[in-house]
Image (spheres, grey):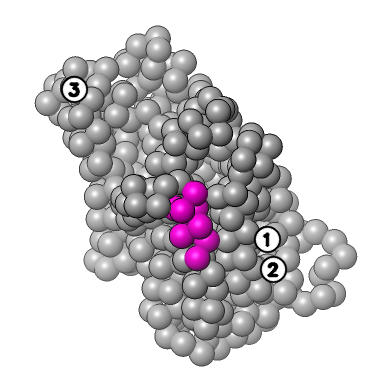
Amino acid sequence: MEAQPKPIRPSGVVAAGFGVGQVVAFASSFYLMGVLGDAIARDLSVSVGFVFVLVSAQLAVPAFIAPAVARRIDRRGGKAVLVASHLAFAAALIVIGFAQDAVGLAIGMAALGFGMALGLSPTPFAILVALYGEAARRPITGVALIGGLGSTLGWPLTGWMADHWGWRGACFAWAGVQMAMLPFSAWVCPRTPGHGPHASASKPDVAWDRAMVQLAVLFACAWFVSTCMSAHLPRLLAAFGLPMRAAAAAAGFVGIAAVTVRFLEFTVHRGLPPLATTRVATLMHPLGAAILALFGAPAAVALALGQGAGNGMLAVAKGVLPLSLYGPRDYAYRSAILGRPALFAQIFGPAVYAAALERSAGVALLTSSGLCLVMFAMTFGLSVRRPSPQEQVIA
């Protein structure tokens, strides 16, 4: 095992810097069209449905290119990839801001997907593993904790920008923020040597064993449910009898719960086995669903809290479990191929769940809860790796 590079800056500074970068990255990509989609559709004379088809296409871009990006990170380090992501995001946002028709919008959205492949959480997670090895769990949790504010801060900020400058101005403003983040990321991110150019001719030796399949199923189900809830939770709660405004307010507890559990994992729960916390996380949504089914609309917040808590812990597990089971070697590539089914699940999730919700709220709730129980089953039979003393790195 190669010695881990000694970080120049404290791990807390690096994790906090990466977390701020993730807030900006998610706010200006993943959550952008949730605020601007209607206005863009109206001004470009396209349907709202078409805009969200492009959102699905945007999500497909990382699914196809993430493994190649990950191989690059494993070979040569992730700093250049993270810095380049700001350029990619800014360019994409400028293209969207100047779009005059559906073609221009489609090009901008595809470019935004390329930026997501470079700059969303797998890249900072891989850098942290390169820096801290087996001790990366806490900084990964810190990044997830701060990055979880992407929707909480991103939606109102984008809305404020759109109110004052229009949707084009909001895109240009986020492009400016991305360019401002570039020198900050270059400063906060230490250079992390990879495995070297000798590994560039072939793919890493990552076998699809039983544990890999289980993790892939677990994360695919988790991201399917998460995307469905992001798109449909207020509608699902309204189907149980809440007025839409109250349903939207109850759904807002998802973000509060997610940030809270990540904070607890960063502080008091940091010594718990990651496999155990993942197992608990898979049961949070079904628990909230059971309470909602039993007590109806007055218990709507229970589902939001369960979904938020479970998703908050699973976002950390996505970064930590591959490290715990397989160690830091080829971490970025392994994480990328494990996450590929999840990326495809995100694309189709909202449409599939909409069909289930049209049948009945109960069918929709059983669908998402059943997938969570599949996730629970996937946590059994996994064996956490015990690192050698030489691999232990104190962050």
Q: Quadrant of residue 141?
A: bottom left
Q: Is residue 316 magenta?
A: no
Between the C-alphas of marks 2 and 3, the distance is 50 Å
The chief SS type of the magenta part is helix
Q: Residue at x 31, y 24 (%)?
A: 235
Amino acid bearing label 1: Ala
Q: Earlier in the sequence, mark 2 or mark 3?
A: 2
Q: Is residue 285 left or right of residue 300?
A: right
Q: Position of residue 120 (x, y in %)?
A: 54, 57
The residue where tag 1 is placed is: 70
The residue where tag 2 is placed is: 74
Between the C-alphas of marks 2 and 1, the distance is 6 Å
Amino acid bearing label 2: Asp
Depth check: 111 or 7 in front? 111
> Quick check: 179 above or below 219?
below
Q: Is residue 121 left or right of residue 117?
A: left
**Circle 2 SS class:** helix
The residue where tag 3 is placed is: 243
Q: Position of residue 173 (x, y in %)?
A: 46, 60
Between the C-alphas of marks 1 and 3, the distance is 45 Å
Q: Position of residue 371 (x, y in %)?
A: 44, 29
> Quick check: 395 above or below 178?
below
Q: Is residue 378 left or right of residue 147?
A: right
Question: Which range of residues does the magenta coloring cover?
Answer: 168-176
Choose mark 1 or mark 3, whichever is in front.
3
